[in-house]
Amino acid sequence: MPDKKLLILNSDQVRQKVDRIAYQILEDNFDESEIIIAGILPQGSNIAVRLKNILDKIAPFKITLINIKLDKQSSQLHFESDTPIEICSNKVVILVDDVLNSGKTLAYGFGVFLDVPLKKLRTVVLVDRNHKSFPVTTDYAGIALSTLLNEHVNVQLSENAEEDAVWLG
């Protein structure tokens, strides 16, 4: 039996979801002078760049983008970032990933900031699958899906955004 994929979001819908999340971030942080958007590599960083581009046009505050690479296979927190994490001190940090499944990636992402005094930490995902093994919730989600555990959510993001899609298969 061939594997069937179900289109959950097309490119226009992905763009609409990211736009809406950007406006939610703006509304929740309007009084800030700067926020940090921390994208988890690879897909979370792609979404983070899109959020930054939108916020650069609509927000009165400065937006700083950092990329975080997590070693999710390790039993201890190991990460790399393209910017020193200390720049986040006393600022709002928006942690971005593509899909929230078990919550492990976002839990590791929280760990990156444990030794930094933050004003607040918020989370963004494009798809929340509702299968959490860790007590993690999202502050901003494009779509929440109730899926079977054996189903896979594939987020496809293209450079020009014309071939973006979210598939369930």
Image (cartoon, rainbow, N blue to C red):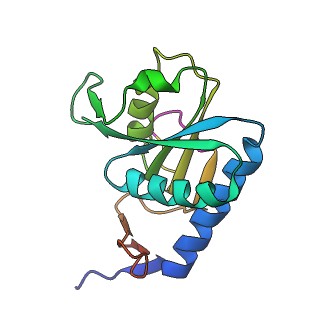
Does any portion of residue 6 appear in the rendered image? yes
Classify residue 14 as left or right of residue 106.
right
Q: In this view, does 60 lie to the left or right of 9?
A: right
* Residue 17 position within the rendered picture, expressed as x and y whole percent measured from the top left: 60, 67
Q: Report the magenta residues as a range.
A: 133-138
Say if 77 sits above or below 20 in the image: above
Q: Which of 142 and 4 is in front in this view?
A: 142
Give left or right: position of 79 versus 29. left
Q: Residue at x 27, y 80 (%)?
A: 3
Residue found 24% across the figure and 24% down from its top = 75
Residue 9, relative to residue 147: is it above or below? below
The residue drawn where x is 44% and y is 40% is 103
User: Which residue is at the front of the view, 57 or 74?
Assistant: 57
* Residue 10 visible in this rendered orientation of the protein: no
Report the residue at 57% width, 76% height from top: 13
- Place of residue 45 in the rendered image (x, y in percent of width and height, measured from the top left): 39, 51
User: Where is residue 86 shown, x and y percent of the image?
Assistant: 44, 21
